[in-house]
Amino acid sequence: MRAGISPGYWRDRRIGGSAHRRARLETVAERNWDRIVIPGAGGMVGRVLAAQARREGREVLALTSARCDITDPAAVTRVIEPGDVVISCAAYTKVDAAEAEPERAHAVNAVGPGNLARACAAAGARLIHISTDYVFSGTQRRPYEIDDETGPLSVYGRTKLAGESAVLEALPGAHVVRTAWVYEGGDGGDFVAVMRRLAAGDQPVEVVADQIGSPTYVADLATALLEVADGDIAAPVLHAANEGEASRFEQAQAVFEAVGADPARVRPVSSERHPRPAPRPPYSALSGRRSAEAGLTPLRPWRDALTSALDAHGVAAG
């Protein structure tokens, strides 16, 4: 170890660590940013991303679906200008509902990204497109690398994979950033928020133990997306998820414990006990190894990120 370097230094350099935050503030102070355009700014990721970009002093054009319907090529063309960096958070994310309305899911998740990519190509703008771990089948038992074989099980996963292809075909310099199990942990409907509310009660809670993935704090994802926007990363496909893996059961137990509730109240069950219209991959943890090699700062461990998320909402136990 080099003199003066503490044992936790390199871990602290991960996205979410204090050393990484300091480095980003120094970088922000030195640079003039291109405009960040965010379609889908009405959703969780888009809202948090826009707020974070503005805090860093960037020019942001935040577009809800009402202001920019990405399924309308003309609407997309009107808002993109030369030099823009478009970070598309627009998506049809109702995984179960997509099974009943595949045409709508395809329009938003596949056709829309293609429209964005063509508009960016015509304008001379960059595009960062967010995708999902659900493009994988879940048949392997090691974290998925960026070039592992895809095999989506659901309409949602298939349409997101089609969106990846549409983006990279229309704009070869674009980036596809896959993430997984994104949560904010506030008062919304994400998994952590729901577990928080259930933890406040006194009843046992059944949570599936046979779905394993990479829980990802939305603030850390936003930081990663802005780093992709700023950097010179050649890899077209990247993974941005908090480090490590957990089952939904383990994630729920971690939430209960973090807010001071009894984690023993969380009971493990199989997915068969709680069937859903859309099948989920049984294992979809994402590896950030290849993304780190390409230049993206790794995200911190998922348990550390969960603590920060709950602290941000004033609900973590002391």
Image: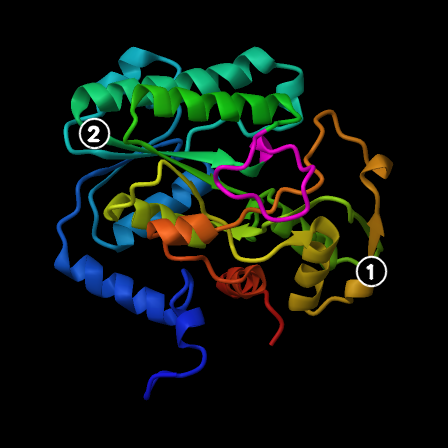
**Range of residues picked out in magenta:** 134-150
**Residue ID for mark 1:** 265
**Residue ID for mark 2:** 125
Image height of 49 relative to 124, above or below: below
- Using the rendered view, name the quadrant where residue 210 is placed: top right
Q: Which residue: 62% across, 28% down?
A: 95
Q: Is residue 140 magenta?
A: yes
> What amino acid is found at the position of numbered circle 2 in the picture?
Ala
Find residue 184 and report its horizontal and vertical position in percent. Answer: 52, 50
- Counting the numbered discs, the total is 2
Residue contact between numbered discs 2 and 1, judged by CB atoms under 8 Å: no
Q: For the N terminus, which image quadrant?
A: bottom left
Q: Which residue: 66% across, 19% down?
A: 99
**What type of secondary structure mainly makes up the magenta span?**
loop
Local packing at callout 1 (Cα closer than 10 Å; few below 14, some 14-19, many 20+) is some
> What amino acid is found at the position of numbered circle 1 in the picture?
Arg
Left or right, 170 with reference to 268 = left
- Using the rendered view, name the quadrant where residue 237 is placed: top left
Local packing at callout 2 (Cα closer than 10 Å; few below 14, some 14-19, many 20+) is many
